[in-house]
Amino acid sequence: MLTMISISIIFIILSNIMMFLSMILSKKSFIDREKSSPFECGFDPKSSARIPFSLHFFLITVIFLIFDVEIALIFPLISTFMFVNMIIWTKISYFFMLILILGLYHEWNQNMLKWTN
């Protein structure tokens, strides 16, 4: 029990020494303050938080996330090709691809894929 306490004290002392040395040896300047300030989506955190946000940028992000998740669902479909009945696998994969293509067609008709309005 005594050795556990002594090892814990040694680790605490060593970690405090290392933190103190890093604070002393690090170079602080005004540029480092900019780097350490929070950064969120290109907005200055010290100004108003009610700056208009591009809805088109948001829609492109949502479309990317949807297709990213769908690609993650395609990988197990490919890996089960050898273990499932060929007819059932073909029907499932065609249905899944049909849903993807219909979603892409809908986004195309809504002009979500155009960067300029």
Image (tube, grey):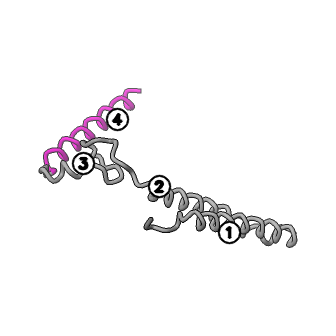
The N terminus is located in which quarter?
A: top left
Q: Earlier in the sequence, mark 4 or mark 3?
A: 4
Please name whichever residue, 13 or 90, is drawn nearer the observer in this view of the structure: 90
Q: Earlier in the sequence, mark 3 or mark 2?
A: 3
Q: In the rendered structure, find residue 101 and report the number of the disc placed on it.
A: 1
Q: Circle 4: is it few (<14), some (14-19), or many (20+) Cα within 10 Å?
A: few
Q: Could you tell me the amino acid type at mark 2?
A: Phe
The magenta span reads 1-26
Image position of 62 (left or right of 89) = left
Q: In the rendered structure, find residue 7 and report the number of the disc placed on it.
A: 4
The C terminus is located in which quarter?
A: bottom left
Please name whichever residue, 89 or 52, is drawn nearer the observer in this view of the structure: 52
- Give the residue at mark 3: 36
Q: Earlier in the sequence, mark 3 or mark 1?
A: 3
Residues marked 4 and 3 touching at CB (< 8 Å): no
Residue visible at 64% across and 62% down in the picture: 70
Q: Residue 73: give x, y in percent of width and height.
A: 67, 61
Q: Nearer the viewer, mark 4 or mark 3?
A: 3
Predominant secondary structure in magenta?
Answer: helix
Q: Quadrant of residue 109?
A: bottom right
- Give the residue at mark 2: 58
Q: Earlier in the sequence, mark 4 or mark 2?
A: 4
Image position of 66 (left or right of 78) = left
- Give above or below for 39 relative to 17: below
Q: Residue 101: give x, y in percent of width and height.
A: 68, 69
